[in-house]
Image: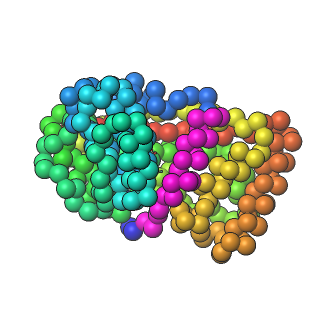
Amino acid sequence: MKIDYQEPSKDLLMRIDIHEKYGSANIDIWTNDLLKPQAGMKILDVGCGAGKLSFLFNEYTQGGAQITGGDFSEELLDKAREKNRETGTSIDFQFLDFNQPFKFEDNTFDLCTSAFAIYYASDLDFTFGEAHRVLKPGGRLFVSGPLPENKQMFYEIIKEAANATIPPMPGSSRFKGDIFNTIDKIFAKTELHKFENHLTFPEVAPFIDYVRASLGEDRKLWTSMFNGRDEYEALIGKIQAVAQKWFDRDGKLVMTKVVGGILATK
Ligand SMILES: C[S@@+](CC[C@H](N)C(=O)[O-])C[C@H]1O[C@@H](n2cnc3c(N)ncnc32)[C@H](O)[C@@H]1O
């Protein structure tokens, strides 16, 4: 299954910022507690985007791990390299398309991670096969992504506003099923962990910022719901009206992110 998806940096960074501003829990702490990356490890972060996880591991290991971040978006890789320059770090950010063979030898990495990314892969057996191949024996794979109950309020508001079917999202529709099962089949041991984050919006505007950073035409995930800019703006207007109604009724808008972390050992 070919998934046509792209992540503009402005949308990704907006969503990360909103999670940090309005969330009740910190996904970085959860990730580090779970993985405890160590100095001396070789780490590959697949679909690294602007380098969120790579920088997190670098900080946690005080620069002692050898970290490679790979992504197919040159725009996001440039952001990551810019941050390398700003922070004086030397993480290796390089082009990697997870639908193509990874350009690394067998048994290279101690840890291979992918946050909210690798589940967009076209052929799960192939991509997770590559992750397995480049890991050392005993090496670990960590993949995070949305569980089916993720962001229910977000989808309900959009459904009420659009009066239409929400397109299936490659993450939440496959994470607990196909993705977990594929990893479980390939790896020696697989566990599913869970992280919950309640985002409380004190007004409607930041929720609409989040909606725009999710539904944007460039991401190509929601385009079945509108045709061109005018229809997109009309849909956002309807979502805003429903969100305002919910806000007036409840005095706040709470969206719960329910994230799964698949941790597997080779
Ligand atoms: C939601 S973002 C997550 C980025 C980053 N891991 C983070 O947590 O901030 C998904 C990422 O997957 C990347 N991606 C999508 N398809 C890809 C592919 N075929 N190969 C490599 N990266 C891909 C996108 O460019 C984007 O950076």
Inspect this view and state whether residue 179 appears: no
Q: Residue at x 81, y 45 (%)?
A: 246
The picture quadrant where one finds residue 160 is bottom right
Magenta extent: 3-22
Q: Is residue 57 left or right of residue 108?
A: right
Magenta span contains residue 11: yes
Magenta span contains residue 190: no
Q: Farthest residue in the bottom direction? A: 227
- SS assignment for the magenta stretch, majority: helix
Q: Is residue 163 left or right of residue 112?
A: right
Give the image location of residue 32, x and y in percent: 39, 27
Give the image location of residue 56, x and y in percent: 40, 33
Q: In the figure, 36 relative to 92: above or below? A: above
Q: Residue at x 56, y 54 (%)?
A: 10
Give the image location of residue 133, x and y in percent: 17, 49
Q: Residue at x 76, y 36 (%)?
A: 202
The picture quadrant where one finds residue 222 is bottom right
Give the image location of residue 159, x and y in percent: 70, 58
